[in-house]
Amino acid sequence: MENSVGMDCGVFSAIDFKRKPIFPYVYWGMRAQNHRGHQSHGFLSFDGRFHTHHSLDLIPKIKKNDIQQWLDHLPGYIAIGNVRYTTSGKLDEKALIRGTQPVLVKKGKLKLAISFNGNVVNTVQQKKELCKAFPDFSYECDAELICRKLAVELVEKRDLQSAVKSCMNEIEGAISVTGITPDGNLFAFKDIHGLRPLCGGCDHDRNVRAFSSETVGLDINDFVRDFEIRPGELVMATKDGFEHDQLVAARKKAFCAFEFAYFARPDSKLNGKHVYEVREEFGRNLGNEYPDIVKDADLILSLPETSDDAAFGLQDGTELRWERCTRRHRYVTERAFILLSRERYSTINRKINIIDHKLEGKNLIVVDDSIVRGDTTKVVVEKMRRLGAKKVHLLITFPRILGPCFYGVDMATYGELIGSTREPEEIAQAIGADTVNYQSLDGFVKATGMKKDELCFGCVTGQYPTPMAQRLANWMRRRFESGHKETGRIYEVNVENIT
Ligand code: SF4
């Protein structure tokens, strides 16, 4: 529930081989994934020509009378969509509009469109290279960078496979892309570590094929879930099925572990497991790992909604009751990070209502998915104490975050992270809780069903799966520890001399 951490993006794309209007599928595929990005959204369709729609904020509801207008505006049998929370580029409103995806790039006669989820680490080097081919290139977002890179390579090498392979080999970072080729083919690919999710599926008649960040994008369209794209793999949607092409041998797989704890919708499937079941297991693990806390507590509370399943799991494995007295105001959708820090307190009130009489004189276990900056958690703990809670023990499903993320999560510096220098006891003191207790890394891994070396835990262990991220992290840590002021998003400044 730590709402001060933003997530990167969500993508959905589809093609109808019967050439029927595709927009409704893409619209619903994106509506199902609006949790992955609230700042802007966009659609791009193809009927021989490209058509675009870009806007800020959440994807709107479409009224019955407006449907035809949308279909006229976005005609065609192929379309891609995107929801975005920016972790690259500038942050003012104009820049947000310019950075809205999908992006369409022209290079000579060639036109190429993509929708992207992730974050580029070697931005500066790539920008420099691209300026040779596009002298007017004013970088707005990583999606534009990737699309331009693909376009340059396509012009030079003339086939998509080679262009994508160059991207995979030369661009470091989390890259989950779906796009439309100049001749109207739908494709998708992932970086060589497979950091972010991207899956494929089709309708029951196998006329429509689709790609989606999360499986919920397929479910909402009643599509058959088919596969998760492998790291280093390019997949083409064709009339006869999906064509898989392993372009670059997958190096160490490194799927973002934070997707399981926080980002992904509970009803999505990651690695073949429903996220809510994994989170329930997190809750059972926490009960087993902290029996003394369980013994000391009267009630379990959760911070809705990403912690609810873990709270259910904890209740399942103990004698304690999960009291659902923290309720989310369903239609308040602003996230804490878009507000000034002095406004955060009232935002929590607007977002969550805590039913007071249940807390009076009680020792509480409060389950949360993560502690990033700690400001949100601090406000919640303060509020629970004001409402009469005797003790507040925090049980946190994601292990302690002590370093930044370079792969699309809005955690850019050491200084902003409450766990970067503090032990759990010190964190408890800083946020006013009696205890702070994190799930063990091994317990977390076991619950996911994945192997430890298939997951990225860079922000937890300081071991990042890609070389430049590791170099940046080491350099930033040294500077932070010697008292230098940190700049956010270090990967966007000139870092060539970093050793
Ligand atoms: S560093 Fe953390 S948040 Fe970023 S991709 Fe790795 S596990 Fe996910």
Image (cartoon, rainbow, N blue to C red):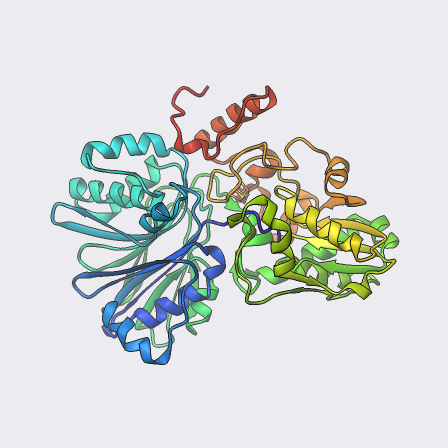
Q: Image quadrant of residue 460? A: top right
Return the residue nearer the eye: 165 or 107.
107
Q: Residue at x 74, y 49 (%)?
A: 382
* Residue 360 in the figure: left or right of residue 246: right
Q: From what the image shows, is residue 91 above or below residue 476?
A: below
Task: Find residue 257 and report its horizontal and vertical position in percent.
Answer: 56, 47
Q: Residue at x 66, y 36 (%)?
A: 419
| Residue 181 can be seen in this image | yes
* Residue 261 in the figure: left or right of residue 159: right
* Residue 465 in the figure: left or right of residue 438: left
Task: Find residue 488 and report its horizontal and vertical position in percent.
Answer: 48, 34
Q: Residue furthest left?
A: 109
- Quarter placement of the N terminus: bottom right
Task: Find residue 141 and report its horizontal and vertical position in percent.
Answer: 35, 43
How many numbered callouts? 0
Q: Residue at x 57, y 38 (%)?
A: 459
Q: From what the image shows, is residue 498 above or below residue 70?
A: above
| Residue 272 can be seen in this image | no
Q: From what the image shows, is residue 356 above or below residue 409?
A: below
Q: Image quadrant of residue 427? A: top right
Task: Find residue 449 and report its horizontal and vertical position in percent.
Answer: 60, 53
Q: Residue furthest bottom?
A: 65
